[in-house]
Each structure stands twice: as C-alpha cells, then as structure tokens.
Image: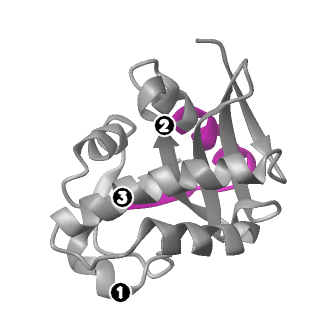
Amino acid sequence: METSFEFVSSLPDPAAFEVMMTEYWHHMSGLLIGAGGPKYTAHDLTANTMANLDYMAPPHGRLLLATASSGELLGCGVIRQVRPDAAEFKRMYVRPKARGLGLGRLLFEYRVEEARRMGCATLYADTVKGNTPMLSMYEKFGFSYIPRYPENANGPELEPFLVYLKRAL
C-alpha cells in the first residue's frame, strides 16, 4: 500500500480526520475502561479533539498524517510542545487495515526527527496501562518509565490508569 506522510498545518479533510479520531477514541476509551478507568464516550472525546485542534498546529504543535495514494487517511501522530526544550507525543493511531505495514514505526520516526527540528531535547508520552503495542513501541524507541510529568495533557485523575514515559533526544 503506497503511503505518504506529511506534517500539516491545517486539516485537508476535517470530516475524514474526525471519523479517524472517533475510531481512535473508541479504541482508547475501551482500553481505559479495561484498565479500570472512567468511562468516556468516543463521541465526546472526538468533539473535544476537534474543538482544540490548535495544539496540533505550528508553532507549538505538529500533526503528521499518513495517507494512502487514494487519499484515505491511514494514521496520524501529534507532537505537542510543552516547553521550549520538550514535547509530548499524542494521538498516534494506525487504522486496523493498515497495521502490520510499518506505518506506526514511520509515524514514530518522523515525529522524533520533527521534535529535534523543533529544538526539543526531551520527549514525553503517556498511554493507558495494558496498551502493549504502544508500550512496546515506546520501549523500542528508547523511552523509559517515569512518574507523571507536570506538563502531561491528561488530568491527574487519570494517573492511576496511565503509564508515563520519557526519552532524551
């Protein structure tokens, strides 16, 4: 499957991105509930994401889209700058039909390089406890486990259900 990767400053197809974010949040809210966390609806989480797209846009954010040659969105990943020297990885998702093709690895690698270009020396991330594929990816890319970092985008009430990670660049 031929795929292109592009950091975008605005969404080329907001409706398609919203559909993909609904898939993402459906998956993540299921993991959160499975970890004993609160029940959030994918609809509400998607609405919040769409209402706050500014954190994904330059100068302090980046949104990387993976798109098939047909124009279909296959995945995404976000960088959210939390300090001049540090950023947080957010919203990494590869649609089920595109999994196993190396898109996740490329979304990860491109974001690491972009964070370097942004002047970041440290990367942070979080994910739901038990999200084995994501945790394996973070471990593979040299992230280590840490306590909750102050700039984390999620509220402290979610701390018992999340894993926090850090990597020096």
How far apart marks 2 and 1 lie (CA) works out to 27 Å
The three-letter amino acid code for the residue at tag 3 is Met
The three-letter amino acid code for the residue at tag 2 is Val
Answer left or right for 152 relative to 60: left
Answer left or right for 122 relative to 100: right
Name the residue furthest top.
1
Answer left or right for 8 relative to 136: right
How far apart marks 3 and 1 lie (CA) works out to 17 Å
How far apart marks 3 and 2 lie (CA) works out to 12 Å
Mark 2 or 1, closer to the camera: 2
Q: Which residue is mark 2?
A: 94
Q: Is residue 23 above or below residue 44?
A: above
Magenta segment boundaries in residue numbering? 108-126
Looking at the picture, tell me which residue is in the foreground, 41 or 134.
Answer: 41
Mark 3 or 1, closer to the camera: 3
Q: Secondary structure at mark 2?
A: strand
Pick whichever of labels 3 and 2 is earlier in the sequence: 3
Q: Which residue is mark 3?
A: 28
Q: Secondary structure at mark 1?
A: helix
Image x and y of residue 142, in percent? 36, 41
Q: Which mark is residue 156?
A: 1
Looking at the picture, tell me which residue is in the foreground, 164 or 31.
Answer: 31
| Location of residue 85 by image quarter | bottom right
Image x and y of residue 98, in percent? 48, 25
Residue pictured at 51% horizontal, 26% vertical: 103
Image x and y of residue 65, in percent? 68, 39
Residue pictured at 66% horizontal, 50% vertical: 17
Residue count near mark 1 (Cα–Cα under 10 Å), binned few <14, some 14–19, many ≥20: few
Task: Report if residue 164 is visible in the image.
Answer: no
